[in-house]
Image (cartoon, rainbow, N blue to C red):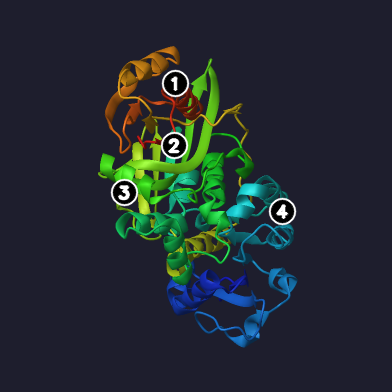
Amino acid sequence: MNTTPSPIRIGVLGAGTVGAHVIHLLQQWSDEYERRLGTRLEVQSVLVRRLDAKRAFPIDSSLLTTDPYEVVAGKDLVVELIGGVDPAYDYVMAALKNGSAVITGNKALIASRGPELFAAAREANTRLYFEAAVAGAIPVIGALMSSLRGDRVRQIAGVVNGTTNFILDQMTTQGADYGEALAQAQELGFAEADPSADVEGYDASAKCAIMSSLSFGRWVSVESVPRQGITALSRDDIALAEGLGYVIKLVARAQFDEEAGEPVLRLGVEPTFVPLDHAFASLHGPANGVFVNARAAGTLSFLGLGAGGFPTASAVLGDIVAAARDRLNGLGAMREEDELPVKLSDNWSVVSPFIIRLSALATSGVSESVSRVCSSLEVSLQGIDIEAGDTEGESVVTLTTQAIARDRAHGLVKALAHELNTHVPPAIFPLLDI
């Protein structure tokens, strides 16, 4: 009697860089997957925009279609790799309503429409898998959903956008300005023709929202994550960081705390000074990294390739194998967890030390003026340095604050700029302290 289960039927939505790599590896490693699962993984149809397009790896033309609902129909697993919210949402929703398990690497979709998709999965007694939505090959989603579910996550910090990390790395190591570094990223395929989702921080905000939703007991929408991109950064900013012993990275932060006895969540994405001896400082090119601090586990680090065909395909393939195994074991929808009454901070109030540099049109009494302003705002300093500026009668003031909320740090800058009669825009950057 043959007890081998029927093959797992797979439909793939999208055959771009990641999709082509996923299909290639599914075929190349098919015998290994059959050994692990006891049945074959069988790609039956693939959605493409053009049937005759050139692809990273050849795909059997009999599998290709331009009809998304042909791909979705009658499949055990549907892999969504087209990106964006629309029309991906409609295709994924159709697959879930059909009872298919869905694997996606679409961070924008999960961050903006996650609750609706998870509800549809529960209604159809199936599951949604999305390891590839954050940090490519780095298994941080699995850690937050499984390994750390018995712990209490207190803080997350992540360099989670490969495009901006490549640009900042070029500005730091090669002396390029922002425009030059962006052009090189586009030439090498690390940045899109329209790079705004990456360089304006939208991509990192979506990933921050997803990690926060999995960690802090409530759903966090991408719109809830304040952001500042890297487009305004200059060589002067890079030089300031280097002179003080730091590098600049675009860092997503999430902090769980209590205010007046109530749980509160502080979120934000912005350029951040990272100490040279921190692991994030060693992330070059499109590499990603995530630090997670949990009450029992302490601080855990996840570092690796966050973009590219093979790294992202690795995360997708892991979810495909997990989804197939769950399917074979008869596992249905995951239970919906009750949400905790966690408040999102009203202000952009991520807490960290801040580095501030101002130019004052004065040479005497500067230290006293700084002390007076800091005292009035109840801000303590780790250090202060005052040196002569390039212009006669100018003093350059560099401050490092103790850990304070971002909105308070920016209020301090405004007060100091007024008190010291600054004539150029001040520089202010948070300092990574996890």
In primary-sequence order, the first of circles 4 and 3 is 4
Disc number placed over residue 419 in the picture, else none = 1
Quick check: 310 left or right of 330? left
Which residue corresponds to mark 4? 124
Q: What element does badge 4 sit on?
A: loop
Q: Which numbered marker is on residue 321? A: none
Q: Which residue is mark 2?
A: 424
Identified by mark 3, the residue type is Ala
| Residue 271 pos. (x, y %) | 44, 44
The image quadrant where one finds the C terminus is top left
The amino acid marked with disc number 2 is Val
Q: Mark 4 or mark 1, which has the lower sequence index?
A: 4
Q: Earlier in the sequence, mark 3 or mark 2?
A: 3
- Give the position of the N terminus as an image quadrant: bottom right
Q: Is residue 108 above or below residue 194?
A: above
Marks 4 and 1 sit apart, C-alpha to C-alpha, by: 62 Å
Residue 281 marker:
3
Within-10-Å neighbours for mark 1: few <14, some 14–19, many 20+: some
Other-residue count near label 3 (Cα within 10 Å), few / some / many at <14 / 14–19 / ≥20 = some
